[in-house]
Image: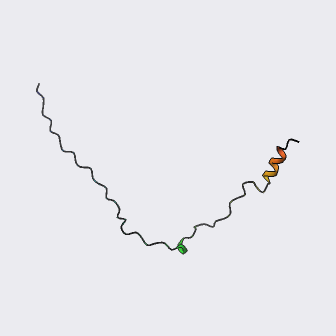
C-alpha cells in the first residue's frame, strides 16, 4: 500500500466586500422639514394627581 501524493488545490481568495463611498454626503435636511408623523402630547402624571409626599409623611409619622 503506497501513499498517494495529495495535491493541494489552491483555495480561492475570499471576496472583499465593496465599501460604501462616503466622500460625498447627501444634502442636509432643513429643520423645517423635520416634522413628527403623529401628534405629540404631554406624558401622563405618574402620581395620578395625588400628593405622594404628604401621603408618605402621614403614613410614616408614627405619632
- Residue 36 picture location, percent across and down: 58, 68
Task: Report the colour scheme.
Answer: rainbow
Relative to 7, does residue 25 appear above or below in the rendering? below
- Residue 32 picture location, percent across and down: 55, 75
Residue shown at 23% from the left, 49% from the top: 13
Q: Is residue 56 left or right of residue 25?
A: right
Residue shown at 34% from the left, 64% from the top: 21
- Residue 16 picture location, percent across and down: 29, 54
Of the 4 image quadrants, the one containing the N terminus is top left
Q: Is residue 54 left or right of residue 43?
A: right
Q: How many marks?
A: 0
- In-front residue for pair 2/32: 32
Residue shown at 53% from the left, 73% from the top: 31
Residue shown at 80% from the left, 54% from the top: 51
Check the image and name the residue furthest to the right: 63
Q: Is residue 59 left or right of residue 20?
A: right
Q: Is residue 14 left or right of residue 34?
A: left
Of the 4 image quadrants, the one containing the C terminus is top right
Where is residue 46, by image quadrant? bottom right
Check the image and name the residue furthest to the left: 2
Amino acid at each position: 500500500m503506497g501513499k498517494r501524493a495529495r495535491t493541494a488545490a489552491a483555495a480561492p481568495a475570499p471576496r472583499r466586500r465593496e465599501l460604501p463611498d462616503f466622500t460625498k454626503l447627501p444634502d442636509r435636511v432643513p429643520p423645517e422639514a423635520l416634522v413628527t408623523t403623529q401628534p405629540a402630547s404631554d406624558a401622563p402624571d405618574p402620581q395620578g394627581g395625588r400628593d405622594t409626599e404628604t401621603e408618605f409623611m402621614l403614613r410614616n409619622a408614627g405619632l
